[in-house]
Amino acid sequence: MISIDVVSESNLWIGRIKKPDIFFNSLVLVFPKKYRFIKKKVSLTILLSNNKNIKKLNKKFRNKNKPTDILSFPFEKKLNIKKSPYIGDIVISYEFMNKPKVLSALEFKSKVTKIFIHGFLHLLGYDHIRLKDFKEMLTEEEKIYKTIETKIAKIA
């Protein structure tokens, strides 16, 4: 089972997702079995941030002096849940998720869900440096999203 600790450093998030901790923990409950880690205890942290703060992290850790939608920081280079059940940290920028500003509540949650899935797969070791890896990661993202797409509206 996956447990997510959600921290918000931007009050803007609460206007769009009332209870982010319940939202993200409920999302992973409806992930495909392969990604639920049913008989294991797996955890991660999500920082709900903004462009200003994610830009600082992007500069510090990736040497890119610009904001981005999401950053993922795997705890280990190679995933080994038996050794370390903590898989890492994800940071998401509110401004990137809230474009365009006319997104409905469901559209916003869907967009956040898609980017969360992307970051989650990075924590599991997926990347998109080579085209082959990009295609593999995109396929996995789409599989997970299709499994949970109809359930997003019902999640807090």
Image (cartoon, rainbow, N blue to C red):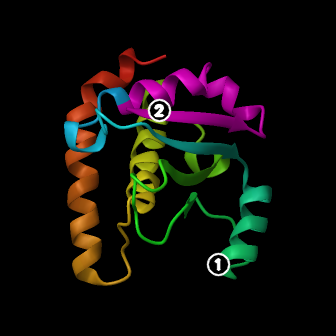
**Residue 119, x across and y down, in percent:** 46, 55
Say which residue appears at 54% left-offset and 44% top-offset: 44
Name which quarter of the figure residue 27 lies in.
top left
The answer for how far apart the CA atoms under marks 1 and 2 are is: 27 Å
Any mark on residue 15, and which? none
**Residue 128, x across and y down, in percent:** 36, 74
The residue range painted magenta reads 1-28
Q: Residues within 10 Å of mark 1 (few under 14, many from 20)?
A: few
**Residue 140, x across and y down, in percent:** 23, 55
Say which residue appears at 71% left-offset and 59% top-offset: 54
Closer to us: 17 or 103: 17
Say which residue appears at 19% left-offset and 47% top-offset: 143
Q: Residues within 10 Å of mark 2 (few under 14, many from 20)?
A: many
Callout 2 amino acid: Lys
Quadrant of the snapshot with the N terminus:
top left
The residue identified by callout 2 is 109
The residue identified by callout 1 is 62
From this viewpoint, is residue 104 visible? no
Mark 1 lies on a secondary structure that is helix
**Residue 64, x across and y down, in percent:** 68, 79
The relative height of residue 84 versus residue 21 in the rendered view (above or below) is below
Mark 2 lies on a secondary structure that is helix
Callout 1 amino acid: Arg
Say which residue appears at 28% left-offset and 42% top-offset: 145
